[in-house]
Image: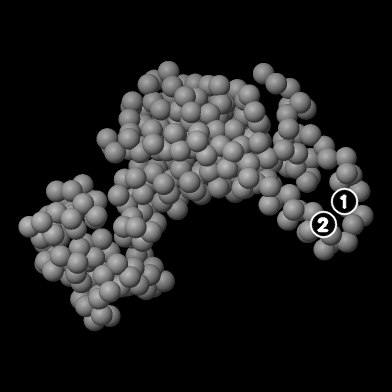
Amino acid sequence: MTLLAGLATETRRAEHAGIDLLPTAEIARLMNAEDRTVPEAVAAELPAIAAAIDAIAERMGRGGRLIHAGAGTAGRLGVLDAAECPPTFNTEPGRIVALIAGGPAAFTEAVENAEDDRAAAVGDLDALHLTADDTVVGISASGRTPYAVAAVEHARALGALTVGLSGNRGSSLGAAAEHGIEVVTGPELLTGSTRLKAGTAQKLVLNMISTITMIRLGKTYGNLMVDLRATNEKLRDRSRRIVALATDAEPDEVTAALDATGGQVKNAVLMLLADIDAATAAELLDRHHGRLRDAVQAAAKD
């Protein structure tokens, strides 16, 4: 295993040694300049990211789960990604899961020693009863965090798909996984503070993995979130706008369709586009596994 001091994410930028003496505006400029390099680092890994997404979508299409596993900032980003999918894509409970070293308390409080607990990673995964259709994404800026590496190694031994997302080339995590994604963002503005560029890169990649996987699973219609779960007034307003954008229907027609479908955006869109009732729309969507575009095309042939 590579020593921590030898990792790019741990290297000191000598030119920033006097950063605390600079004016605030200059520090902000330097930090912004560092942040602008992150998308380029992610772009270099797009082939690996796309390959991982295709493999994940295939398994999720068979009913598998997407499971993130990490410690510290990496673990919290995994929790954030998992928490955002149900309201955005109406994913079923337990379909996208996040494991964080130290348990749920580690999301708001640092549990630094937990990241070294390999046995905890094994136990956390065993509690989920992994199958070959599941995917485990280990997340670690260093690429050597024991909790993340152990999670990936154990998941792979059980036949699950594995992805290793790290911030250093030639990482233990990348080697352990079937799909290694190594986004090298280099030394941080504050030496070793990988919640900065490395964390930003992880967030961007996790956005891609979950969003594009959901697109592949038919959770969108074009670039519209038709599987949106409207749980507050903002989202109910967004639902109305999405239905209107997808159908060009008048406001009263949109409202009537959403009322008839219990607020289900996808069903309301299909009702209006195919000129069918709510029950027929629900049956057609069920027949096409919730894929709105397929249902619309099938309705047009009938």
Q: Residue at x 76, y 26 (%)?
A: 6
Element under disc 2: helix
Q: Which residue is mark 1?
A: 19
Q: Which residue is mark 2?
A: 27
Q: Nearer the viewer, residue 37 or 166?
A: 37
On the image, which quarter does residue 182 sit in?
top right
- Indicate the amino acid at tag 1: Ile
Q: Are marks 2 and 1 in contact (CB under 8 Å)?
A: yes
Q: Residue at x 41, y 27 (%)?
A: 161
State the image coordinates of residue 113 (x, y, percent, origin top left).
65, 31
Q: Residue at x 36, y 49 (%)?
A: 215
Vertical arrangement, residue 230 with respect to residue 166, above or below: below
Looking at the rendered image, the quarter that the N terminus falls into is top right
Q: Nearer the viewer, residue 21 or 116?
A: 21
* Label 1, residues with CA under 10 Å away: few <14, some 14-19, many ≥20: some
The mark nearer the N terminus, 2 or 1, is 1
Vertical arrangement, residue 196 with respect to residue 262, above or below: above
Spatial CA span between label 2 and label 1: 7 Å
Q: Is residue 52 left or right of residue 149?
A: left
Looking at the rendered image, the quarter that the C terminus falls into is bottom left
